[in-house]
Image (cartoon, helix red, strand yellow):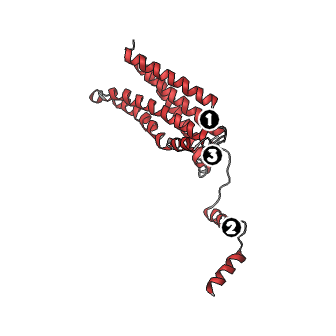
Amino acid sequence: MFSRPRLWLIALGAVFILVLAWVLLHAPPDGIEHGELSQFVGRFHPLVVHLPIALLLLVPLLEGIGLFRRWNHLRESAGFVLLLSSISAFVAVFLGWLLAWSGGYEGKLVISHMWGGFSLAVALFLCCLLRLWDIRAYRIALLATLALLIWTSDKGGKLTHGESFMTRHMPDTCVHCSMCQPRQRKSGRQSKRREQLSQTQRPGISFRNILCSASRSCL
């Protein structure tokens, strides 16, 4: 059975999960900005979000090395690292929601990434409990949590860099073997040429205006 301090931590974590779920359900990102201070605080999300990711990736490494008798003491620190990963994940989820809600974000991809982060934080909390209760169930849950991390990180990467960031320069052999949609690949010269044309064809700017300004400067 769990000791009294652990029971208090479990109860506190359950309450925080319920409160955070209520906030996400009743105040989803709606595309409207909601304040300067909340936007300032929410923009710490890209900085904080890497902490639970790094800590979570460290957990299976400590667990694996700890299987050897010589390094068995490392398994004791894996539980502490997992707890820190769970706490920092909830902080990152709250900051991410605050950024999306106050910064005027909206869309299906934003919602998917938000709930993916929340599910990841809950999964980390469950891993902390299972590690103390059933080691086999804990190992299965840890693998599932790593898979959820990959899915959620992919959604976050698409939000930051675009939906085709990972597949834009994928080799043709990988495109045919995967579920990715065919894309139109542009050569470096073509994309650079189009960028130059777009810059010279902006409203109010033409080659004649450029030549006229150059001739005046030479006078």
Front one among 76 and 5: 5
The residue beneath circle 1 is: 112
Q: Is residue 116 left or right of residue 78?
A: right
Q: From mark 3 to mark 1, how far is it between C-alphas?
A: 13 Å
Residue 68 is situated, as x and y percent measured from the top left of the image, at 31, 28
Q: Which one is earlier in the sequence, the residue at label 1 or at label 2?
A: 1
Whether pointer 3 and pointer 1 mark residues with C-beta atoms closer than 8 Å, the reply is no
Q: Is residue 75 visible?
A: yes
Please identify, in this view, whether the residue under mark 3 or under mark 1 is nearer the observer.
1
Residue 138, picture quadrant: top left
What residue is drawn where x is 57% and y is 33%?
116
Crowding at mark 2 (Cα within 10 Å: few <14, some 14-19, many 20+): few
Residue 111: horizontal and vertical position, in percent?
A: 63, 36
Under mark 3, the amino acid is Glu
Label 3 or label 1, whichever comes before in sequence order: 1
**Quadrant assignment, res 186:** bottom right
Categorize mark 1 by other alpha carbons within 10 Å: few (<14), some (14-19), many (20+).
some
Give above or below for 200 relative to 175: below
Residue at 62% over, 35% down:
112
Badge 1 marks a residue whose secondary structure is: helix
Q: Is residue 33 above or below residue 2?
A: below
The residue type indicated by label 2 comes to Leu
Q: Which residue is mark 2?
A: 197
Whole-number angstrom distance, CA of label 1 to CA of label 2:
37 Å
In the picture, measured across the screen, residue 73 lies left or right of residue 161, that is left
- Element type where label 3 sits in the image: loop
Q: Residue at x 30, y 27 (%)?
A: 72
Q: Earlier in the sequence, mark 2 or mark 3?
A: 3
Say which residue label 3 marks.
Answer: 163
Q: What mark, if any, has residue 5 been given in the picture?
A: none
